[in-house]
Image (cartoon, rainbow, N blue to C red):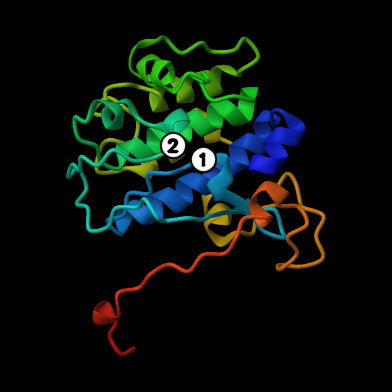
Amino acid sequence: MFTYLRRDQRFAEDRAKVYAAEMIDALGCLHLNGIIYRDLKPENVLLDKDGHIRITDFGLSKQGMKMNELTHSFCGTPEYLAPEIIKGSGHSRGADWWSLGALLYEMLCGRPPHYNRDRQQMLRDICEKPIPMKPYFSPEATSLLKMLLERDPKKRIGYSDRDADELREHPFFASIDWNAVKAMTHEPKYKPKVKGPEDISCIDKLFTKEGLEETYVNPNALTDA
């Protein structure tokens, strides 16, 4: 997604809506399995050969989390950090919904809501500064963004035990067939021009030129399959 956002600057609302719906389905599945993702950003969202999204890089994920259990690690990417992570007040799965709001905002206008080259100022802005809603956002998009980018995690959409279902019911997604999203039978708004599932020609060379490093695995932690 990083490559396409940089190329297109921003997406049409219908296209952003489908991507957001697929992310909600993915994050909702993780939450049901006690996993907080904690690093949603364009670089970690891939498009497969059919145009469906695939979330990658689970290095910052937290496992074994109960529905509203809090964890206090400071982790993530500054542009998409929830205020409660920045403040160190404890965060749960609602931090993923904030990150989704920041990414949806970026898909619709080209930049995350509080982007600033001065990272310390950006973190302060995330916690304090009002979020400008662009005049070309639809009323439904504006409503959803305000609910996702609510600084109080207990007031943020998705806080209740219903989690992702709260988002699915928002009017912004009125045109989405959630059964089709789950089965991946809906038609994506964009299909990458690739030769097959292993074609990486659409991935920015910034990433494909990176060196390969093996992840250390403690041999004492290995068990027979």
Residue at 57% of width from left, 41% of height from top? 42
Identify the residue under disc 1. 41
Q: How many marks?
A: 2
Residue at 32% of width from left, 49% of height from top? 36
* Closer to us: 118 or 183: 118
Identify the residue under disc 2. 77
One can see residue 169 in this view: no
Which tag is nearer the camera, tag 2 or tag 1?
Answer: 2
One can see residue 8 in this view: yes
Is residue 25 placed above or below 103 in the rendered structure? below
The C terminus lies in which quarter of the figure? bottom left
Nearer-N-terminus badge (2/1): 1
Is label 2 in contact with label 1 (beta carbons under 8 Å)? Answer: yes
In whole angstroms, how far apart are the C-alphas of marks 2 and 1? 8 Å
Is residue 56 placed above or below 118 in the rendered structure? below
Residue type at numbered disc 2: Thr
